[in-house]
Image (cartoon, helix red, strand yellow):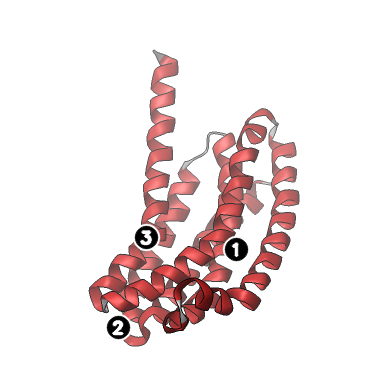
Amino acid sequence: LSMFKGALQYGFLAFTCGIMQLANLRLDLFLVGYFLSVKEVGYYAIAVALSNFVLRASKSVSTVLFPRYCSLDEQKSNKLTATIGRHSVFLLSMLSIVIICFGNPLIHLLYGKEYAFSYKPLLILLPGVIALTITGLVYGNFMGKGNLKIGIYAFFVSLVFTVTLDLLLIPLWGIVGAAIASSISYGAGALVISRRYLEES
């Protein structure tokens, strides 16, 4: 019974983090749809989809590392997070440069020249996606130790930034404003969780 209660509590916290993270990633699309036309939702959705190539690569790293985090002591886990974090940020920055170089022709090839408006928000989203990589890796470290509350706090801060900045910037700058809001909110979440990681390690 005690194991069941522990698993239930852990699962509830993990589920809450997952819901807030999903809201952070998807809420901007709904707000773009609320303020702008369906056509601009399409432009923005393409930018989000292409930026997700970087995000998916980072999520696979976090998924593979999670069992490792659980099996290591705190000092080794912290050291692994720092090492993998540096390598991941470097490699995903290289992948982002490839997307910057070939994103525009790729959009033309896959969707047509009329979707060229997707390219600018794509460029703005890429730094935010790299910030999400940092958040994911550090959050995986905390999850492995059973400390999910810091994840809830970081994702909540990010969500507040997402909602506030989207409401301010989308009416002003359209899908570019949505991309700026997302990148800033992802960066804010990364800052919160990284600061806690630095304090503990």
Q: Residue at x 43, y 25 (%)?
A: 7
Q: Residue at x 42, y 15 (%)?
A: 2
Between discs 1 and 3, the one toward the N terminus:
3
**Helix, strand, or loop for circle 1?**
helix
Residue 103 left/right relative to 112: right
Say which of 101 and 109 sits in front.
Answer: 109
Between discs 2 and 1, the one toward the N terminus:
1
**Helix, strand, or loop for circle 3?**
helix
Between discs 3 and 2, the one toward the N terminus:
3
Answer above or below: position of 143 versus 159: above
- The single residue placed furthest to the bottom in the displayed view is 172
Which residue does the numbered mark 1 point to in the structure image? 130
Type of residue at label 3?
A: Arg
Which residue does the numbered mark 3 point to in the structure image? 26
Type of residue at label 2?
A: Pro
Give residue 171's mark. Answer: 2
Type of residue at label 1?
A: Ile
- Within 10 Å of the Cα at label 1, are there few (<14), some (14-19), or many (20+) other Cα atoms? many
Give residue 148's mark. Answer: none
Q: Residue at x 46, y 43 (%)?
A: 149
Whole-percent x, y for residue 76 in the image: 75, 37
Answer above or below: position of 39 versus 134: below
The answer to which quarter of the image holds residue 42 is: bottom left
Whole-percent x, y for residue 187 in the image: 53, 66
Give me the C-alpha separation between circle 1 and circle 3. Answer: 17 Å
